[in-house]
Image: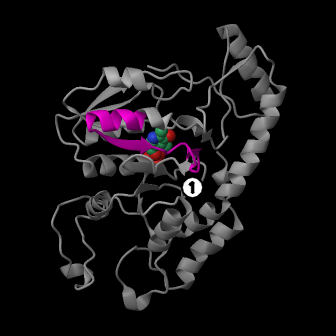
Amino acid sequence: MPGFELIGKEEQEAVNQVFDDGGILFAHGFDGMRKNYHVREFEVLMAKHFDCSHALAVSSGTAAIKIALKALGVKSGDEVITQAFNFIATVEAILDAGAKPVIANVNETLNMDASDCESLITDKTKVLLPVHMLSVPVDMNKIMILAKKYNIKVLEDSCESVGAKYSGKYIGTIGHAGAFSFDFGKIITTGEGGMVVTNNPAVDKYTREYHDHGHENNPAFPRGKDTKSIFGFNYRMTEMQAAVGKVQLSRLNHIITENKLRYQMFEKNIPHSVKLRKIPDGSDPIYDTLIFFTESDNEKERYVRILTDEGFGTKNLPDAL
Ligand SMILES: *Cc1c(COP(=O)(O)O)cnc(C)c1O
């Protein structure tokens, strides 16, 4: 996940520019004093790049998941189905939205298994929350069929696979909403940060208001007299983060191309006896991680040792729960 490895002069200049332009670090207001609206520009660039109608910048990927769950109508007592191989943030966001996390198993893609997911659906299930883990898309066709059949919403946790595609579409834009993360370990970074993407105007309206204390940013009123119809919370992104984000976004395609070259080099040279993680048909991962299975713990430790000694970032993934 190399966004942070490429951070340099351009990102620094983007931050300096924010200060040279007057040092407005807040996304809204101060209209007479500012030259740019970096958060707003970052959102427009993101929506364009990912070919979706709405993108909302927020303070983290975890916040993006929680806000999107609320926008999809998740309330206390509801169930949200996510997957066994995961990062804790997904479950935290479900709990913070007041719902109960239900854990579906994963298959040989190491992402959500649709049949196991189906067996867990009850009349309390409000949202399916597949997670595109470590660069590889979930087999989304199967998940979307379930969503239709049972009339359930789908939120894609795309935090670890920003830029991956499934059936020619960017992941995050296939379900009813998607969550991206720009924390320091992700493919592009703003230090901390996240984004909610959606093609649904109602989801965008709710998330936009909720993440900003309910503000509607009504153009008829100054911010201090702004209209509100819901209460919310503060999950805003700063202008500094967005200034960095715009530069990082311009590097994304280059990063993916470079990742793919290295991935293919590994793939070609790996012994035939080693079983690689399955990649769903018709999907384009972002190739920042190559996952393979070993026969025994001994073999696993040997691979970890050899690769680590050779300077490759290597880890033994935790067993799926
Ligand atoms: C990183 C990550 C998140 C949360 O993102 P933060 O920006 O760190 O809050 C959520 N889900 C997955 C799968 C992640 O890897």
- Residue shown at 53% from the left, 58% from the top: 50
Does residue 206 appear left or right of residue 53 in this picture? Answer: left
Does residue 111 appear left or right of residue 121 in this picture? Answer: right
Q: Is residue 321 above or below residue 69?
A: above
Callout 1 crowding tier (Cα within 10 Å): few <14, some 14–19, many ≥20: many
Which quadrant of the rendered structure holds the C terminus?
Answer: top left
Q: Is residue 97 above or below residue 12?
A: above
Q: Magenta stretch containing residue 159, yes or no? A: yes
Residue 254, image quadrant:
bottom right
Q: Whole-percent x and y of residue 218? A: 25, 78
- Residue shown at 24% from the left, 64% from the top: 213
Depth check: give the residue in front, 304 or 83.
83
Q: Whole-percent x and y of residue 130? A: 42, 35
Magenta region, residue range: 143-168
Label 1's element? loop
Q: Whole-percent x and y of residue 101? A: 30, 30
Which residue carries the number 1 mark?
Answer: 189
Tag 1: residue type? Thr
Does residue 58 appear left or right of residue 36 in this picture? Answer: left
Depth check: give the residue in front, 237 or 66.
66
- Residue shown at 58% from the left, 72% from the top: 15
Q: Magenta stretch containing residue 139, yes or no? A: no
Residue 219, image quadrant:
bottom left
- Residue shown at 59% from the left, 39% from the top: 135
Any part of residue 118 in sight:
yes
- Does mark 1's beta carbon lie closer than 8 Å to ligand 1? no
The extreme right residue here reads 269
Residue 34, image quadrant:
bottom left
Q: Whole-percent x and y of residue 263? A: 75, 37
Which quadrant of the rendered structure holds the N terminus?
Answer: top right
